[in-house]
Structure formats: C-alpha cells, structure tokens
Image (cartoon, helix red, strand yellow):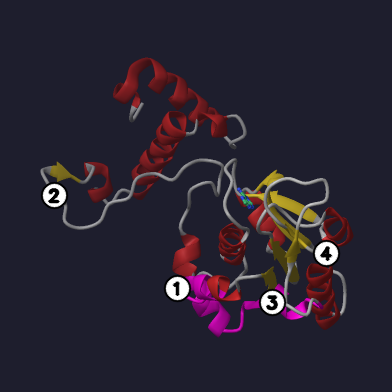
C-alpha cells in the first residue's frame, strides 16, 4: 500500500514511521511511505507557504497554490485520483473500522495542516475525507497522520507476522482486551490467575472473554452498546453487575 504525506515537516513523519513494525514493512516492500515537502512546490520567491487570513484574525493560513501543486504532482505520479485525507479536529473521529477500511485502498494521500488552517478553496478541490483523531487540538497534522498510518498499516495483510495478528486485540471485536501476564508466576506478592496455569484451553478462553466484558464495562461502557455480544455474555454481565466476582464460572 502506498502512503503519500503532504507536509511542511517531512523529516518528522519519515522518522516517526521508519521504525519498528511499520519500518520493517516498508523495508520489505509491503508499504511505501513518501513524505512530500509542500515547500518544494511554492512559486513564491521567498519560499513562503502561508499568508495572512482575509478578514483578519490571529495566525497564518496555508496558501492554496503550494498545497494544490504538491497534491497534483503526487496524483499524476499515481496516475489517478485517490482518497485524500485532511487531518483536522473538524473531521469524523478515526476508529478501528476506518483503519480497516483504508487498508483496502492501494494508495492514500494525507494532508497535514498547520498554523490556523489551510485555504478552504484547495480543501474543496482535493480532500475526500476530513478525519480527526480525537476531540483535542494539536499544533499540526503530522502526529494525527502518523497515528492513522500506523493503525491502517497493521491492517494491511502481511504487515503483522502471523503471531502478531493472531492475537485477539483491544477493539478488534468491539471489546477491550483481557489482561495479560508473563513470567514469573509471582511478582511483588501477586500471583498470575490460577486458571491461566491450568492448561485447560476452554476455561482459559471463557475466563478471557469474561475479563474482556468486565474491563469494557468498567472502562468503556459505551462500547458495550455496539459490541457483538452473545446470550452468555449478556447473562454474565448482568450476573457480574449484581454479584461481582461471585459471577465467575457460573
Ligand atoms: N490537527 C490538529 N488537531 C487534530 C486532531 N485532533 N485530529 C486530526 N488533526 C488535527
């Protein structure tokens, strides 16, 4: 999958995305991540990429021309128009479903804004998706774009090893993940739950499902409204709410 990032800070995104699992996938040729410096496309003789806002007000606005020309150069290189994501707190909030959906594309362009924003006319011309990573305001779009690319990339077949992708994970089934433990069996006076040492696969699975339900109810109860729950899940949750830990193994 090809990612093109239009940015004023190409070094920032290159460094952020060329390490660990995403870096390995890029080296293996599964992902191609290109940072395109918007400044390289400005026609201004002082290499300016922003200007004062019409109507007054604080801050600067990124000019349409360099953003458009950078986008056009990338689009011509790809050979067709592809989805173009603008990272903005005014967008729809990015979720795991979006990561999966974007992973089905061959190529995506991301635009990182800065200052007070980007001239609306170029956004109207090029942007297909306005996406936020949450209800808070960052200084620029680079971090949100790195977050989205990381989440999308791990959904691209082959990016995670079998072992990595085989794990049931937080949010994958609409629930938070159960707690994990590794050696030693006792640490700081706390033992690993006995059931995990039992070797009884079915009981371990049942315990993990129950832990996922308890954790989701405690930390993200909103997720229970849309999670895929079976009759046993509903039964366990209502018992747990009435009886607490006594609901286990019933
Ligand atoms: N740019 C600034 N803040 C942002 C946010 N929360 N999400 C996406 N892009 C942004």
Q: Which residues are magenta?
A: 14-43
Which of the numbered marks, if any, corresponds to residue 173?
Answer: none
Real-space Cα distance between discs 2 and 1? 31 Å
**166 sits left or right of 227 in the view:** left
Q: Residue at label 3?
A: 36
Residue drawn at the location 71% of the way across and 44% of the way down: 90
Upstream in sequence: badge 3 or badge 1: 1
Q: Nearer the viewer, residue 195 or 23?
A: 23
Foreground tag (3 vs 4): 4
CB under 8 Å between discs 3 and 1: no
| x 27%, y 48%: residue | 196
Question: Circle 2 sits on which residue?
Answer: 186
| Mark 2 vs 1: CB contact within 8 A | no
Tag of residue 64: 4
The 10 Å Cα crowd at callout 4, few under 14, some 14 to 19, many 20 or more, is some
x and y, in percent, of residue 157 in the image: 61, 70
Name the image quarter holding the N terminus.
bottom right
Q: Nearer the viewer, mark 2 or mark 4?
A: 4
Q: Where residue 173 sits: x, y (%)? A: 56, 45
The residue wearing badge 1 is 20
**Is 166 placed above or below 21 here?**
above
Mark in front: 3 vs 1:
3
Marks 2 and 3, the one that precedes in the sequence: 3
Location of residue 139 in the rendering, given as x and y in whole percent from the top left corner: 58, 54
Query: Mark 4 or 1 closer to N-term?
Result: 1
* First in sequence: mark 3 vs mark 4: 3
């Amino acid at each position: 999958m090809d990612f093109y990032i239009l940015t004023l800070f190409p070094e920032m995104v290159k460094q952020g995305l060329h390490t660990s699992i995403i870096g390995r996938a890029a080296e293996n040729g599964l992902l191609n991540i290109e940072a395109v410096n918007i400044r390289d496309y400005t026609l201004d003789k002082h290499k300016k990429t922003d200007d004062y806002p019409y109507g007054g007000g604080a801050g600067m606005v990124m000019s349409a021309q360099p953003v458009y020309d950078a986008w056009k150069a990338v689009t011509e290189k790809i050979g067709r128009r592809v989805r173009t994501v603008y990272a903005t707190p005014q967008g729809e909030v990015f979720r795991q479903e979006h990561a999966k959906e974007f992973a089905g594309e061959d190529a995506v362009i991301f635009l990182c804004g800065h200052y007070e924003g980007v001239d609306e006319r170029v956004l109207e011309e090029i942007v297909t998706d306005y996406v936020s990573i949450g209800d808070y305001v960052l200084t620029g779009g680079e971090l949100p774009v790195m977050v989205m690319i990381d989440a999308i990339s791990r959904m691209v077949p082959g990016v995670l090893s079998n072992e990595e992708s085989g794990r049931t994970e937080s949010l994958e089934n609409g629930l938070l993940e159960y707690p994990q433990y590794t050696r030693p069996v006792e640490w700081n006076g706390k033992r690993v739950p006995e059931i995990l040492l039992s070797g009884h696969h079915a009981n371990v699975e049942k315990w993990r499902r129950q832990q996922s339900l308890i954790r989701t109810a405690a930390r993200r109860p909103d997720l229970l409204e849309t999670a895929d729950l079976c009759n046993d899940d509903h039964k366990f949750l209502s018992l747990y709410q009435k009886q607490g830990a006594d609901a286990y193994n019933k």
